[in-house]
Image (cartoon, rainbow, N blue to C red):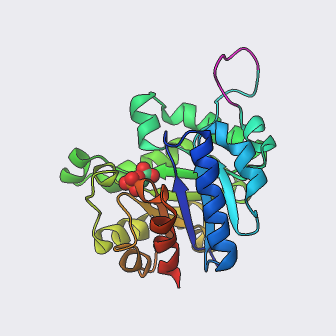
Amino acid sequence: MRKKIVAGNWKMNKNLQEGVALATELNQVLTAEKPNCKVIICTPFIHLAPVSNIIDHSIIELGAENCADKASGAFTGEVSAEMVKSTGAEYVILGHSERREYYNETPEILKEKVDLALANGLKVIFCIGESLAQREANEQNAVVKAELEGSVFHLSAEAFSNIVIAYEPIWAIGTGKTATSDQAEEIHAYIRSIIAEKYGNDVAENTSILYGGSCKASNAPELFSKKDIDGGLIGGASLKTADFKGIIDAWK
Ligand code: PGA
């Protein structure tokens, strides 16, 4: 059975003290009332080590929002997958549309990052999704297929079991505009079908596919009720405990 997941993506928000306070509060709330799903928080690099020491990892898992495409050495300012892992983090988000767009991360670069993350024992939340222009041209299926083929479909079936997919239509990220649950379900089912074509039904059925893009407590129950939507990757609404908890509770 695939896992139900609610993952937070803090992006470039919260200074160290604010981030530690948010993680502390979330940990308190979720240890008092255990979630019905896997909960992951993905934080800026500087928060990883202190947050790792605060949280009960059996209830909240920790992830980074990026890692380097090189293993180690003279790459000033970069943070390697091994370094991320050494903080106690279990996950890393790769392929987010903001990284693809603003930092020119190509499918080839992302493939290197995926390989290094897995080689260092991290699980990967791999993001895919189309722009508004691509959706209007009805190219969304081709876009997500190419993104998977470009960066994760070279993996063995065993390695692929460490990948969580996050479908995030770019036009829905931070815009307040959510894909309808039917729109999301349609493409999630398509994504699962191409995973099945590549790796077989068992792997496809065991792969968690998250929806991301203006997901909040008010729309999460409807989105999560769909057969192929296994949870959410949450940006804005992961920055306040009550908002994030409201989404986690959609699984209750
Ligand atoms: P949002 O971001 O929830 O603020 O739309 C989601 C994401 O980019 O992961």
Q: Is residue 204 visible?
A: yes
Q: Quadrant of residue 237?
A: bottom left
Question: The N terminus lies in which quarter of the figure?
Answer: bottom right
* Residue at point 42%, 71% (across, down): 189
Q: Nearer the viewer, residue 113 or 12?
A: 12
Q: Which residues are magenta?
A: 73-79
On the picture, is 36 further left or further right than 241? Answer: right
User: Residue 73 at x, y = what percent?
Assistant: 76, 18
Residue 76 inside the magenta-drawn segment: yes
User: Residue 201 at x, y = what percent?
Assistant: 59, 73
Residue 121 against residue 218 in the figure, above or below: above
* Residue at point 69%, 44% (across, down): 48
Q: Is residue 230 visible?
A: no
* Residue at point 68%, 54% (across, down): 62
Count of numbered circles in the view: 0
Residue 74 against residue 19 in the figure, above or below: above
User: Residue 250 at x, y = what percent?
Assistant: 47, 79
User: Residue 165 at x, y = what percent?
Assistant: 53, 58
Kindly give the residue lying farthest to the left in the view shown: 136
